[in-house]
Amino acid sequence: MKIDELFKVRDLVTIVTGGASGIGLACAQAMAANGAIVILFDIDAAGAQKAARDMAEAGGRVSAMMVDATDRAGLEAAMAGVSAAHGRIDVVFANAGISGGPGFLAMDGARNPAAAMESASPEVWERVLRVNILSVAATLAAAAPQMKKQGGGRIIVTSSVSATKTETHVATAYVASKGAVGQIVRQAALELAGYNINVNALAPGPTATNIAGGRLKDAAAQAGFGALAPMRRIAQPDDMQGAALFLASPASAFVTGVHIAVDGGLLLGRAD
């Protein structure tokens, strides 16, 4: 098969939750630049509208809707609106997520009492689990009926390397949430495979996004986290685009239930 057919996403109706910035925006840009019809869902209405305008000015077919991914009824209504307007939903990027804050060790290896397990408030735990777990579950549940009806589709979840490893510099609530996301992806893939719906995940390592107030856009933080990976840097959102296109395209037709690590070798351990 020729590469332009293998990775063809032209005309695929694509929804991206948390699409106004970061990894969601990068995935949306990759899809739009290759001819997909992209709808950004984000609680940040102004940010999503600006992102949509920018991509439209570059020739993309992109629109935006103000959607809170933790509001299941609102999410289902928005998905139904897309289905009514376009007749189908081919690809959904379940990308919305938040940080849980720093981990129990600072970057210099010292203990951080403010981030100790006993210091994490119930409110922080509830918010992280609501956004990182329940919004993913709600997005899958909202997308599945239309994809079943039309005979298939692709769901790509933004997970994390934290789905399969413990962390010292990342909060326990975040790690727990991504562990749950890992199981949701595998369970959904198992349940939906018979409907020709592929469910997979991007598993980034530390990435320079707006999460945690843009903490990883800081040069010192990038240097600290980058030193942990064999490739000696953290990810930029654009680093996710190749894997995103693979998972959205015919190239991954027989791939489901997997996490693709985009982490500069972080999961391999430290090198030199």
Image: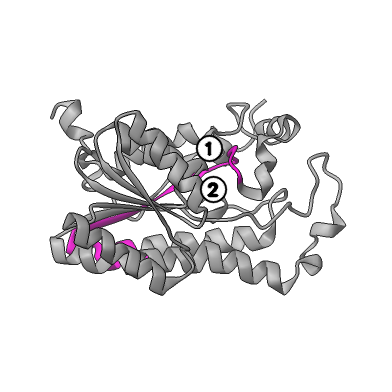
Asked if residue 194 can be seen in this view, the reply is: no
Question: Is residue 54 visible from the viewing direction of this image?
Answer: yes
Quarter assignment of residue 79: bottom left
Residue 27 among magenta residues: no
Decide: few, some or many residues near mark 2? Use Cα within 10 Å; few <14, some 14-19, many ≥20.
many
Give residue 153's position: percent from left, percent from top. 22, 55
* Residue name at image x 20 percent, y 37 percent: 10
Disc 1 secondary structure class: loop
x, y (%) of residue 107?
78, 41
**Which residue was labeled with disc 1?**
263
The image shows a total of numbered marks equal to 2
Residue plotted at (39% across, 60% down): 185
Per the image, the residue denoted by label 2 is: 161
- Screen quadrant of the C terminus: top right
Please give the range of residues in magenta: 187-210
Colour scheme of this structure image? one colour
Quick check: is 199 in the magenta stretch? yes
Q: Position of residue 251 (x, y in %)?
A: 23, 38
Estimate the x, y position of residue 117 in percent, counting from the top left.
77, 65
Q: Which amino acid does label 2 sit on?
A: Val
